[in-house]
Amino acid sequence: MRKSHLIKPVLGNNYPVISHGKGIYLYDKDGKQYIDGSSGAITANIGHGVREIAEAMWNQAQHVSFIYRSQFTSDAAEQLAEKIAEYAPVDLNSVFFVNSGSEATETALKVAIQYFQEQGNMTKTKVISRWTSYHGITLGALSMSGHQLRRQRFTPLLEDFPAAPAPYCYQCPLKETYPGCGVKCADELETIIQSIGPDQIAAFIAEPVIGASGGAIAPPDEYFARIRAVCDKYDILFIADEVMTGMGRTGKMFAMEHWNVIPDIIALGKGMSAGYTPMAATIVSDRIMNVIEAGSKVVMSGHTFSANPQSAAVCLAVLDYMEKNKLQDNAEVTGQYLITQLQRLQWKYPLIGDIRGKGLLCGIELVRDPISREPFDLSTKVTDRLLSICFEKGLLVYPAVGGVTGFSGDSIIISPPLTVTKEQIADVIDILDQSLSDLTTQLI
Ligand code: PLP
């Protein structure tokens, strides 16, 4: 008898089968309810089972679901590009659609290199990132990521891109203390550029709030303005990877708005479709597009499913739903409430070292000693343990751990759908409280 099966993240693990979802809740086939406290992978921004999205899918499917972007365009894709550009800073007007966050950051990398090539500059081909960062799983995106676990098998295939220290104040990679440090991590970018040579570097890429590899780490307020100035000084493009933070997650449409800093390229994904379809985008500034338009006229990237009308119609409906229900505002208000509730838990559990985040992208860092901030030994698997205790009790949270170079700590992300109410946050806190209590007992 032939044995065929779906390849799951960890072979041999038993993953419950989900039968349906409604709002912030998911239900498995045995009837167990889970609070989606992480929106899956910080994706299900409008919650599950929204009827308006199903209707938009059906409406578009009745007309046409697929066209090939080299032959036709569609109203849905044109309207979505217009809508996204309306949200974006004033000179980011061109949108390239892809199917995942990895493709969005990899397209950003290619567009940055192409921008210089079109001007006859063939040496600017490196992208500086930060070690505590994650920009995706494909080889170009992984070359820009510091995720050790995901890199290690493929290191020979990855580009040797330089990395700068992250603005990670709780465990500063430069062993400095804010604000006395004068945000030295931003100055380090300039030192790296000078040592490699600005003529080699096309772009600097950063997550506004570090997600998967750090656990909702927001930088000091002056950090990104300094980064922008350094990039301008050396004619280096600034790419904001808003795959996790974009589309209202942090209480602003784009997280970079928190610091009024305008990137040259923005990568989007996850919340853009809220998980209802695979869709992502790279938004490009006029400065870049003018050069390409005056040159080859072709942005050298693209996939069979790029600008898929079915997916575009879904994203339009998601954005419409967000606007109607003022979800970005809710993210700000309930996010503040979530942080204060998490801070209450911090008083109770010494293993909570740091509480942080922006809007509804919140993180908890777990440490062995809250005074010295000494992390747990990775072999203790504290994050995994907390995740599975929460899971048993019906709460989903997201791990931000994985042997990241320069960071070996344990963090989790709490990021429920942007529809979440204060009452529902109280339920999240309640389960987290019980789970931390169980974990503390296990660790004694
Ligand atoms: N960039 C950031 C900031 C991410 O958090 C992720 C995924 O977690 C990616 C890129 C990659 O996105 P995807 O998993 O859709 O390829």
Image (cartoon, helix red, strand yellow):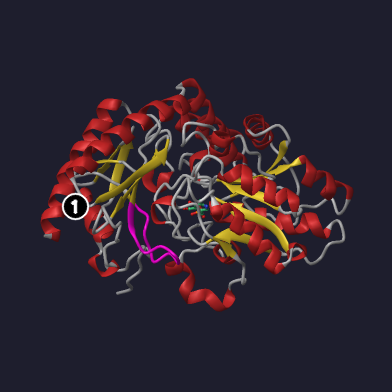
> Is residue 200 located in the magenta-colored stretch of the structure?
no
Nearest to the observer: residue 4 or residue 136: 136
* SS at badge 1: helix
Residue 390 versus residue 93 in the image, above or below: below
Considering the whole magenta stretch, tell me its main secondary structure.
loop
- Which residue is farthest bottom? 156
**Could you say which quadrant of the image residue 126 lies in?**
bottom right
Q: Residue at x 21, y 43 (%)?
A: 432
**Residue 351 horizontal side relative to residue 80, left or right:** left
User: Does residue 143 show up?
Assistant: yes
Q: Residue at x 33, y 35 (%)?
A: 339
Disc 1 beta carbon < 8 A from ligand 1?
A: no
Nearest to the observer: residue 88 or residue 48: 88
**Could you say which quadrant of the image residue 81 lies in?**
top right
Mark 1 crowd level (few <14, some 14–19, many ≥20, 10 Å Cα): many
The part of the chain drawn in magenta is: 399-411
Percent position of residue 281, x then y: 61, 45
**Residue 114 horizontal side relative to residue 307, left or right:** right
Nearest to the observer: residue 412 or residue 67: 412
- Which residue is farthest top? 324
Percent position of residue 191, x then y: 64, 62
Residue 98 versus residue 312 in the image, above or below: below
Percent position of residue 131, x then y: 51, 62
Say which amino acid is labelled 1: Ile
Q: Residue at x 69, y 68 (%)?
A: 196
Say which residue label 1 marks. 389
Q: Residue at x 86, y 54 (%)?
A: 296
